[in-house]
Amino acid sequence: MKPLTIPARMIIAGLAIAGVAAYFLSSSPAAGDQAATIEIDASKKFQTMRGWEATLDLPDNEKAGLLLEAGDAIFDKAADDLGINRLRLEIRSGAESRARSWDRYQRGELTYKEWRPYRYATENDNSDPNVIDWSGFDFSEIDQMIEQQVEPMRARLAARGEKLFVNLCYVAFTKQITNGRYIHGDPEEYAEFILATSLHIREKYGFDPDSWEVILEPDNVPDWTPRLVGRAIVATERRLAQHGFKANFVAPSTASTAKAIGYIDAIAGVKGAMDHVSELSYHRYHKATAANVNAIARKGEKFGKPTSMLELWFGRADSRVLFEDLTVGNASAFQGRTLFGHFDVNRTETGAISVNYRKEVAENRQVFKYVHDKAVRIEAHAAQKSATPVAFINPDGAMIVAIRTSGPMQLTFAGLKPGDYEISYASGKQIVSTARHLTVGDDGKGEATMPAAGVMTIAGVVPHAANRK
C-alpha cells in the first residue's frame, strides 16, 4: 500500500480555498474527521450499464438561441467530460396530423400558447392502420431535434470509438388537448405511428432507434391503462419486426415510482409483451422511497430485465439519488436532466459564452465520466453510514470506485484490483483532479483523503486504453 502524495500546485488551481487543497495533500485525517473502510468484492456482480441518458429539449424562451449558439461547447463537454452517451428522442403524438403546427410555430404564425394544444392532438392519416399515408405525418419537430442535437452527439461519440444510444420515446399528454382527437389508444394505430416514425428516422438519417420507450408517464395520461401499455408493445413489435427492426421496449416510465410496480405486473399479464421489454423504467416524482425503488429491482430480477431511472429533473437527481438508484434499484440507466439542462450557459460582459455545470451535475459526473457503457457493477460496502460506495468493472477491465461522503473523511480501500488509479473528487460544483496516481499492490489496499462532503472517484488506469480523460 502506498500513501497518496500530491503536488499542492496541481490541486490549488482547482480549489477556491487553499486550505482545502492542503488538507487533501495529507494522508492522515485531521482531529474530529471521520474514517471509512471500503471493501470491494469483484466476484459479486450486479447490473450491466446501458447508458447515462439526457432528454433532447429546447426551452421555449429567450435562452433557446443562446443554447444553440453554445451548442458545440455543450456537446463537447457532454460527450467528452460529462459522459452522456444516451439520448431520449421524443416524438409527440401530434406528429400524426396535417396541421403543420410545428412549422407554423417556428415561423411565428402561432404563439407558444396557441401551439401547445396542437402538440398531442391527432388526425388519422387514413382509416387503415396497416397502410401508411405519409402525407398524414409531420416529422419537422423531431427532424430539428435530430439535426440540432442527435447528430452532433453521434459524431462526438463516434470520434471516441463509441456509439450513441438513442431511445425513441412516445409522448402524449392528452389532457392538454383542447380541440381535436386522440387515436393512439388503439394499439394498431399506435403501432402504425411508431413504425412510421422509425422508418422516417432510418430512411432520412440512416440509423435505427436502440430502444422504444412505449409512452412517457402513462399514469399522467387518462387514455392509457397499464394493460394498454402491454397491448401496444405486442402490436408494435409485430409491425416493427416486419420491417427488420429489433424491438427493445422501455416501460412503464411512470411518474410515480410506486405505480411502476403495478404497471410492470400488468404488462407481464399481456401475452408476449414482456418478451420484448428490454428495460423496466421508472421516474421519481412521487413516492420515490427506497422501498419502492428496491421493489422495482426485485421485479427486474423476477422477469430477468434490467431497470432504469429515466427522469428526475430540476436539479433533484443529485448524487444521493444516483447512488440509491444504482445500488438499491440496480438501475442500468439514469437520467437527471435534459441535455442542455446540465449546463449553466451565460453571456459574459465581454460577449463570450460561459458553459458550466449546474449544481448537482459535478458530483454525478464523478460516476458518469468514468463508468462506461456495458460496465458491470460489483459489490462495494462500507460499514460506516457516512460513506456510500459504488463500484464497477469497465469493459476494458478498469476498476472504478466512487464514494459519496457526508463530510471530510479518510478512506481506506480493500479489494482493489492491482495497478494504477487516478483520483478525483467533486464537492458541490467544484471538481478537483489529483496530479499523481494511487498505485495498488497485490494486497489490493489503498488510501485517500476526501477533504469535503461530495463524491470521490478512484479510477483504474488501463495502459493504451481509450479512457475518458
Image (cartoon, grey):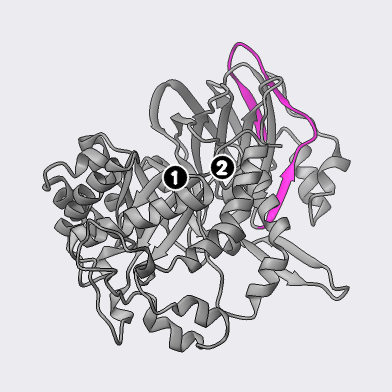
Let me know if residue 320 appears in the view. Answer: no
Say how many tags the image has: 2
Q: Which residues are magenta?
A: 429-448
Residue 450, numbered label = none
Residue 331 visible in the snapshot: yes
Q: Position of residue 256 (x, y in %)?
A: 29, 62
Residue highlighted by disc 2 = 367
**What amino acid is found at the position of numbered circle 1 in the picture?**
Asp
- Name which residue lies at 56% across and 33% down: 401
- The spot of residue 191 in percent (x, y) is 26, 55
State the mark number for residue 208. 1
Foreground of the two, 404 or 55: 55
Residue situated furthest top in the rendering: 442
The image position of residue 386, as x and y in percent, is: 50, 45
Question: In the picture provided, is 378 more to the left or to the right than 72?
Answer: left
Residue 133 shown left or right of residue 2 in the figure = left
| Quadrant of the drawing holding the N terminus | top right
Q: Are marks 2 and 1 in contact (CB under 8 Å)?
A: no
Is residue 74 covered in magenta? no
415 in relation to 320, above or below: above
